[in-house]
Image (cartoon, rainbow, N blue to C red):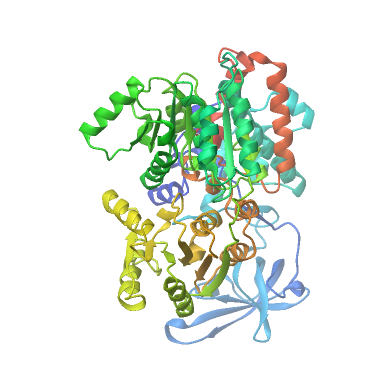
Amino acid sequence: MFIRELKQPVSRLKGIGEAAVKSLASMEIYSVSDLLLHYPFRYEDRKKPVPLVYGRNDAVINTKAVITGHEFFGWGSKKALKVFIQDDTDSAVLLCFGRSFLKDKLPVGKEINIFGTFQFKFGELQSSSFDFEDAELEESALFGKILPVYHLAGSLTQKNLRKAVSQALREYAISINDELNIPLYKKYHFISKETALNAVHFPSSEEDLQKARTMLIYEEFFHLQLVIGRRSLKQHSFERTSRIIPTALQSKLREKLPFELTADQDSVLQEIRIDMESSSAMCRLVQGDVGSGKTLVAFMAALSVIEQGRQAALMAPTELLARQHAENGARLLSDLGVRIAFLTGNINAENRKHLLEELKEGHIDLMVGTHALFTEDVEYKDLALAIVDEQHRFGVKQRVALLSKGSHPDLLLMTATPIPRTLALTAFGDLDVSTIKTMPAGRKVIETHLARIGNEQKVYDFVRNELAKGRQAYFVYPLIQQSEKIDLKDAESMFNHLESEIFPEYKLGMIHSKVDEDLKEHTMKAFIAKELNILVATSVVEVGVDVANATIMVIEHAERFGLSALHQLRGRVGRGTEQSYNFLLYSPELTEEGKKRIMVMKESSDGFVISEEDLKLRGPGELTGVRQSGFLRLRIADLSHNLDVMLQARDDVRELLGTDPGFLQPENRNLRELFSKTPPFSDDLLASG
């Protein structure tokens, strides 16, 4: 069934007018299938009676009660209605703020079903958040059942969303195709997809709900692993002749370095060498904490192909980071005869034309740049290695576009955002993963301190003492400019404040995403050259900025940043041998999640521990940096709690692919049938796959 019907716009449903369509769109719900995949985030059990006698400490009550009286309190426009109720166990009051009309709907003597949160205050049991219904109705809409509770937006209410979902199930989900092949349904005794969808939205019992969730969670993980399996097989389908990789240039670079590589760097280089010598293209992800030396490993890997007379490309997400890689590459590799060039979208036409001609002729060994490296007019003579830094900033399609510039080149991805084990098995399940944990000798653990906004003068005094020693500092803010909607400090206002009132004796610079690239480059060079004492910025300095003399990172409104971003920002200091410090200034109105984030940063400097906590707090899409693209958009499965199910789905997919080599071929009938049924419910699971 019925992909076309499921893709019908939600406006086809009764009661979904223009305002509701806009509200649904804000939650990325456009079609009937999107609506059916908007699963409840909790349920209200209105089948089990909970009498008033249990109504203490925000207890949820579900009982049958009689109206015993009315009373008004307050005065003028603030006058409000009290409705007194009583069941067989206790009495209570309903506080009807702005709903005085309920006096007529709830006359004395009327018997109602009541559901709400109650607490004991001012000597009485009371509730201001409740649902009620005439107890004499033949067919109840709100009671005697388990009701779904959905995330809402705009003008939506639980009532109209439940009604829309109910209609969608009734009219569009009838006899919907099951997406898993029959043997798996039998193996796990799964209920059908139609039954599962009905039960997850409107369960008749806890048992039915659990059966539905079990099937739908497995199904999400199965399709996720199937996409990963397809991608992995495709990457390894091309076979080449095994070869020996030369290492003479690598040895020369080692001799030139003023330090020894760490044990982890040596181990990862050995893994890369084995990959590059194998009969299939390398597809490896190197993860390492901030400052662990991943870029040096990438340059070493590039030397292996350059020594063969071939080419390498290094792609970074920002011009700032790409330029720094190009400059570091030139400093390390030029003496070895390596020809390096830098390419971004901001290079003028004449210089670009010359660069592209040199690249095509093979006169450039290592091309460093941004997404400009894979634009249509870029041609390599023989691209053998594609390196992607901060890979989570790029989608799979962008990586594929870069790889298409060569004939099955090796792929090396790098990330300073350590990947939790669960994500390594899912989002990166088609990659071989290497880890660099050992930090270079001489590095000291960065001290992290917390301060509430309002007490920042102590932080400023500490910064002044460090500046007096010749050190440098970063000040990072969540906004570029002042916002009328959000009361947060911003980079531009704080630059003026810091420069004129706090540190008038020092030189300050500022960079953010709206600063012209030439000015941004000039400012960064001045900071690196110690011509500036303080750099005011947004999170644009999160990656790649490497200034050994900078020992202080001040992040104001730290609660507005994710854990991974905070960890990356903290990693901008501590690059030298001097003790470095990180100050997290937080708002007095801190949410519970904000408190958790701040305390994780205070208590841990291990990026791998932090990444696990980030996964729990923010989810996989945020952590991989590609939430907007639909990448890893799990609707009901939870990597933190359903790891065992995900591992089982992975094993099933591997067994399926292993026992049926033709399963992945487009002409295979089973595959075609499977994927003809998948889009309404699994298309967005791995949109970039």
Q: Can residue 684 be seen in this view?
A: no
Q: Position of residue 254 (x, y in %)?
A: 54, 38
Query: Which residue is at the far left?
Result: 350
Q: Which of 581 and 389 is in front in this view?
A: 581
Out of 43 and 449, give the one closest to the viewer: 449
Would you place residue 243 above or below residue 215 in this image?
above
Pick out the residue farthest to the front.
255
Give left or right: position of 86 versus 551.
Answer: right
Q: Which residue is drawn at 60% across and 34% down?
A: 269
**Horizontally, is 355 left or right of 444 in the view?**
left
Task: Locate residue 452, reporting x and y percent.
Answer: 51, 75
Looking at this view, is 326 or 586 the one in front? 326
Establish if 50 lies above or below 399.
below
Image x and y of residue 92, in percent: 68, 78
**Picture quarter with the N terminus:** top right
Q: Disc count in the image?
A: 0
* Residue 506 percent coordinates (x, y): 34, 72
For the question of whether residue 491 can be seen, the reply is yes
On screen, residue 675 versus residue 123, left or right, reads left
Q: Quadrant of residue 261?
A: top right
Q: Nearer the viewer, residue 470 or 423?
A: 470
Residue at x 36% of width, y 75% of height = 503
Kindly identify the residue that appears in the image at 48 percent across and 21 percent down: 308
For residue 667, what is the image quadrant?
top right
